[in-house]
Image (spheres, rainbow, N blue to C red):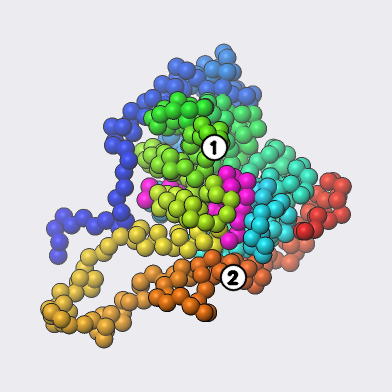
Amino acid sequence: MHANYIHYGSPQFRLLSDTQIEELHFASLQIMERIGVAFECQEALGLLGEAGADVSSPNRVKIPSYLVEQALKTAPKMVTLYTREGEPAIVLNGMTGSHFGGIVGLRGYLDPYTRQPRETYVEDIADFTRVIDASPNIEWHYASSTHPTVPAAIAEKVTLLQVILNSSKPVACTIQSISGLREMMEICSVVAGGEKELRAKPFLMGSSEPVTPLVQGKDAMEGSLLCAEKGIPFFVYTMPMAGATTPATFPAVLAIANAEALSHLVVTQLKKPGAPIIVGTMPSFMDMRTTIFPFGAPELSFLSAAFKELSHYYRLPMFGTAGCTDSSVIDAQTGAEVTYQILMSALSGADLVHDIGMMAVCRVTSPELAVFENEIIDMVKVSMGGIEINDETLPLDLIERVGPRGTYISEKHTLKHFRKAWVPKVFDRSMIKGEGIKTCEELLNEMTIKIIETHQPKPLPEEVTKELKKVEKNWLKQAGLKEYPPRE
């Protein structure tokens, strides 16, 4: 029996003190109240004006701090995401750890058969989706719409449909247009059994991205307001670039990103108090040699981890980033960048983490990279499990019985516990390298291709599939196509 015994269930990790968090919070309030945020959405301006914000200039909407405090009170502290079949899949409440998601549908695709990059085809999206569906440590999908082999007008809907047809896991979608978002909600309602059922057990999420510095764009805001109205969870994330769109110092990046997220939160809570929102940021800096926004930069993960502490201060779920590399091939740079990101996300406790499988500065997706990262996430989970101390895990009586120079290999205690050790699936522990011993790269490639060729996701009911195929046929007709362009 232990009096006042404290047990850590996971590693303890902090970047900011409570006082520093409060200082950043008040700085964000000051930015919103005294400097202001630009709004391009008329509905948002109407909601803010009615609530007491100064909307005399849409380029400098000044939001009083009491509106922020009010929004923080009504925003849900927990968001639950469901599978396509309506089963609970992910609970976001700041306490369940990080849930990693893969990104599909970018412009480029690293073909696992040729190991060369090329344009993404619809078949590639289906293949990659099945890889994610088969990867137990990748829990959701982020459906992008920049793939160039179908018309842009249907790209976002096509990606979402391929994900729904090839996986049961929750899916978030990029939003190119409000009409497209409405159609995507209708598709998901068909799968869920109706709009009411989708609202009750959402497997769809929307996404919104303010423009740094301090601009809430029309389309992004309208998408969030529609999600709020329909009860669909959505995440808002900013992409500040230190030295270009923010001052080149960490606190300034965090304060501006936080003001952008909170001002978005205010509007959506005015629209629908209790609307399920997840806040986040993807902060990096301008690489002054190349002018790019580096996704593999350590600053991105470091600042995201600090932002997580702000979101925990508000008790809001946080949208994070991990698993993206600036390298164009799976190499040592890739391994270093994605491992650092995944570990930082897990240690900070970022709730919903996207970009698994993304490389080449956000231009290419790779199923092979996703399989690699599934292994890394599994590895990191060992460190996140904590150490439980009790009579079973600290068997002093056994240690006394075996004594000095003894061995534990034949003990029942060893038989009971040795299988808890982590065993790699891709990494190789062979002591001797020779004929028949495959490299990590070879195993990774073989595993990826095997999943693509053999994994069968849980099928949808036949009548639902028929309805979705009918909708898909109409899209193709509207786009002037009889079928999707075949993969080269």
Q: Residue at x 54, y 70 (%)?
A: 443
Magenta span: 347-368
The amino acid on which the numbered mark 1 sits, given as a three-letter code, is Phe
Q: Nearer the viewer, residue 239 or 477?
A: 239
Q: Which residue is mark 2?
A: 446
Looking at the rendering, which quadrant does residue 404 occupy?
A: bottom left
Is residue 19 left or right of 210 when viewed as pictured? left
Q: Position of residue 444 (x, y in %)?
A: 55, 66
Is residue 251 left or right of 226 when viewed as pictured? left
In which quadrant is the C terminus drawn? bottom right
Q: Nearer the viewer, residue 318 or 297?
A: 297
| Farthest-out residue, top | 56
Visible residue check, residue 199 = no
Q: Position of residue 162 (x, y in %)?
A: 69, 57
Q: Which residue is mark 1?
A: 293
Visible residue check, residue 10 = yes
Q: Residue at x 59, y 18 (%)?
A: 58
Q: Callout 2: helix, strand or loop? A: helix
Q: Residue at x 55, y 49 (%)?
A: 327
Callout 1: 10 Å neighbours few (<14), some, many (20+)? many
Which of the two discs, 2 and 1, labels the residue nearer the N terminus? Answer: 1
Q: Position of residue 331 (x, y in %)?
A: 52, 56
| Farthest-out residue, front | 434
In which quadrant is the N terminus drawn? bottom left
